[in-house]
Amino acid sequence: MSLVSIIARENFITVMTDGRVTSEGEAIQEDYKKFIQLNKDMFFAFAGSKEPCEFVARWAKDYFKQYGLNKLASAINGFVLNNNLNKYKILAGFGGVDSKRVKLFTYSSLENKLNEFIPEGYHDIKYAFLYNSSTENNDLNLTEILTNGLRKHGFNTSNKCLKAQKELNEMVASKEFGVNNITFDLTIKNSN
């Protein structure tokens, strides 16, 4: 189980992941970073089945170098299907600053679904969660927890957003075995 939260604003994007890896109900690693940088302005984050996610992340890094972000978004589902990975849980979030705009995409192999988020204007905030709960009747409302944190800390800087994301991670970790309090974060700024 994992939690990755991503916030996209017009002038930055923040990513936070927990560090726990589980297998068959046991924690096997506590300090695993669930994102890679595609370049200095782009990232690829993931949650789900570790080895298939890593395989897709390696492909994404190579594919991105040749074709860019939008073509990566268009090709990810085909790659998953062509490699028979759709039987695994693969949740991906990727994006960054592309053509002077912040862009965020999310993908789920379970739904064969791609979503695109582009913040429009200073007050717009987009967010996404890569979260595969082990609890069927999980009562955590991630959106409510995050928006309460953003109200408390503010959301006009990346550091304030990361504080809200850290609180979200701590709340989920207190209720979900598959998520721990060891976190990794990334900020990409749009300097344009």
Image (spheres, rainbow, N blue to C red):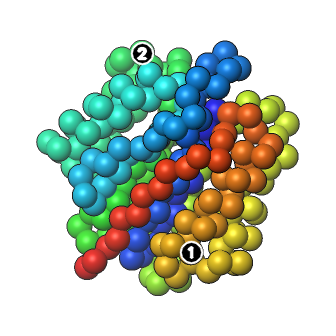
Q: Position of residue 128 (x, y in %)?
A: 56, 55
Q: Is residue 107 left or right of residue 76?
A: right
Q: Position of residue 192 (x, y in %)?
A: 25, 79
Q: CA distance from mark 2 to mark 1?
A: 40 Å
Q: In the displayed structure, would residue 138 be above or below residue 80?
A: below
Judged from the image, the secondary structure of the residue bearing numbered disc 2 is: loop
> Which quadrant: the N terminus?
top right
Which callout, 2 or 1, points at the residue further toward the start of the chain?
2
Image point (65%, 47%), residue name: 181
Q: Which residue is mark 2?
A: 84
Q: Position of residue 96 (x, y in %)?
A: 34, 60
Q: Are marks 2 and 1 in contact (CB under 8 Å)?
A: no
Q: Is residue 124 left or right of residue 187?
A: right
Q: Position of residue 132 (x, y in %)?
A: 65, 36
In-front residue for pair 44/123: 44
Residue with the most extreme left position = 66
Q: In the displayed structure, would residue 103 be above or below residue 83?
A: below
Q: Which residue is mark 1?
A: 160
Image point (56%, 61%), residue name: 127
Q: Is residue 21 visible?
A: yes
Q: Amino acid at mark 1?
A: Lys
Q: In the displayed structure, would residue 77 be above or below residue 33?
A: above
Q: Is residue 89 visible?
A: no
